[in-house]
Image (cartoon, helix red, strand yellow):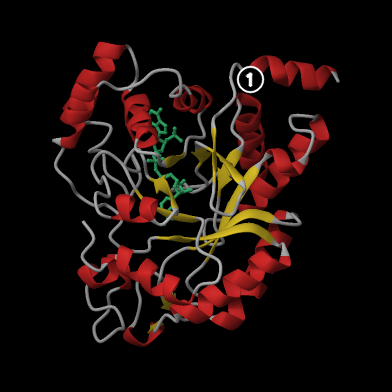
């Protein structure tokens, strides 16, 4: 009881929630689960428990990140010490890796994820990329024979079965273009609840976002700070002069302006920080807003995608170009 009171005192506000097309609620900001060099499991577990103490309730991981185990342990620890009272206070996402994007491999992959995390269910399970590679292949050095055709309908059918079995409350996509979503919807009996894609002031998803909104598919934005300081990211968001000026004039940080902008587009930012101060800062985005003039300035920022998926393009492979992977979405 004392622990519960202590925790409640730390939470100064409730993070808003959005309702997915599956009927389930999702907190409007998520904590990322990938890092260039992840801390050891025990250390990462404490970091994630601390994030829960600070107020995060939505956590993102993936089979390929190496953070599933620590996140699962953090859930157990948070329950044990009373940071949360029930598992259903958290929203946990994981993702099907591209070695398992085949009808027969989806359920075993989800079961493996649940076993690694020690959880009975996920809140959201996503197809990580619309790509299939051979088991054991190195994503950053793919040989011609290692990229296989991706069976969009068979894979989605197996995702639907996962949803029906209750092992995940919602199912969705990640890195899917408008064209691939249209294809998937032709046969789907359960529509994707979410498409998680790169989204930040430098890649504003001007085609995909309205497309998803019209179809009731919620967009979550990865790398909302542009993946600042990571090998896959860029410093363009955090070093933007336009964001710097807006942040100074409002006494906010650049990251807060970047995250608030994503939030104002109706998108859920998935932002990673394992630093206490920055974790707190990144939650303070819900009680103020950007003006029309500030939004207009952000619209002027030159657009450049960072996570293009170019690693999946191999000579004579099933995906011929980055343009083909994204079906021309800009
Ligand atoms: N579906 C996909 O294909 C996909 C792809 C990429 C990422 N994701 C997900 O999206 C999450 C977020 O994306 P991301 O990790 O690429 O990038 P991000 O959240 O845009 O940026 C993370 C970087 O920014 C730093 N940072 C965080 N808050 C900050 C602040 N307030 N001030 C200054 N620096 C700050 C972090 O360092 P510190 O930790 O030191 O604060 C880290 O280096 C990932 O963790 C992952 O869960 C999904």
Horizontal and vertical percent position of residue 74: 69, 41
Task: Tell me which residue sits at (27%, 50%) in the image.
Answer: 205
Is 239 left or right of 43, judged from the image as shown?
A: left
Give the residue number, with chain letter if any, for mark 1. 11
Comparing 208 with 106, the one in front is: 208
Q: Is residue 289 visible?
A: yes
In the image, 277 versus 138, the foreground residue is 277
Question: Is residue 7 positioned above or below 150 on the image?
Answer: above
- Is the CB–ligand 1 distance for label 1 below 8 Å? no
Residue at 52 percent of width and 73 percent of height: 156
The quarter of the rendering in which ligand 1 is drawn is top left
Q: Is residue 8 left or right of residue 235?
A: right
Q: Secondary structure at mark 1?
A: loop
Q: Where is residue 125 shown, x and y percent of the image?
A: 58, 59
Q: On the image, which quarter does residue 59 sit in? A: top right
Q: Residue at x 25, y 69 (%)?
A: 327
Residue 100 visible to an observer of this rendering: no
| Image height of 294 relative to 36, above or below | above
> Looking at this view, is 274 or 265 the one in front?
265
Residue occupying the far right of the picture? 1
Q: Quadrant of the N terminus?
A: top right
Q: Quarter of the image holding residue 111?
A: bottom right
Residue displayed at 72% across by 21% down:
7
Q: Residue 15: percent from the left, percent from the top?
A: 56, 28
Asked if residue 245 is positioned above or below residue 263 in the image, the reply reads above
Q: Position of residue 133 (x, y in %)?
A: 43, 78
């Amino acid at each position: 009881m004392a622990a519960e009171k202590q925790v409640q005192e730390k939470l100064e506000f409730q993070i808003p929630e959005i309702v997915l097309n599956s009927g389930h609620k999702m907190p409007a900001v998520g904590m990322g689960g990938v890092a260039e060099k992840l801390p050891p499991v025990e250390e990462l577990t404490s970091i994630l428990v601390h994030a829960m103490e600070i107020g995060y309730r939505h956590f993102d991981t993936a089979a390929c990140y190496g953070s599933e185990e620590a996140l699962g342990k953090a859930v157990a620890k948070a329950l044990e010490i009373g940071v949360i009272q029930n598992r259903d206070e958290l929203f946990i996402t994981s993702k099907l890796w591209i070695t398992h994007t085949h009808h027969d491999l989806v359920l075993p992959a989800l079961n493996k994820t649940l076993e690694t995390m020690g959880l009975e269910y996920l809140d959201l399970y996503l197809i990580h990329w619309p790509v299939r590679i051979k088991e054991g292949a190195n994503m950053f050095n793919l040989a011609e024979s290692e990229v296989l055709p991706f069976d969009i309908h068979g894979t989605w059918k197996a995702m639907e079965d996962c949803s029906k079995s209750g092992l995940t409350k919602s199912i969705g996509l990640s890195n899917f273009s408008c064209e691939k979503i249209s294809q998937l919807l032709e046969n789907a009996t359960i529509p994707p609840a979410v498409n998680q894609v790169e989204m930040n002031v430098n890649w504003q998803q001007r085609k995909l976002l309205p497309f998803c909104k019209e179809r009731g598919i919620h967009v979550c934005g990865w790398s909302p700070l542009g993946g600042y300081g990571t090998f896959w990211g860029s410093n363009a968001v955090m070093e933007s002069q336009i964001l710097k000026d807006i942040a100074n004039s409002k006494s906010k940080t650049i990251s807060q302006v970047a995250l608030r902008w994503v939030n104002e587009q109706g998108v859920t930012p998935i932002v990673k920080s394992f630093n206490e101060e920055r974790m707190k800062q990144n939650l303070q985005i819900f009680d103020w807003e950007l003006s029309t003039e500030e939004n207009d300035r952000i619209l002027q920022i030159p657009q450049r995608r960072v996570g293009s998926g170019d690693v999946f393009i191999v000579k004579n492979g099933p995906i011929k170009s980055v343009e083909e992977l994204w079906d021309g979405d800009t």
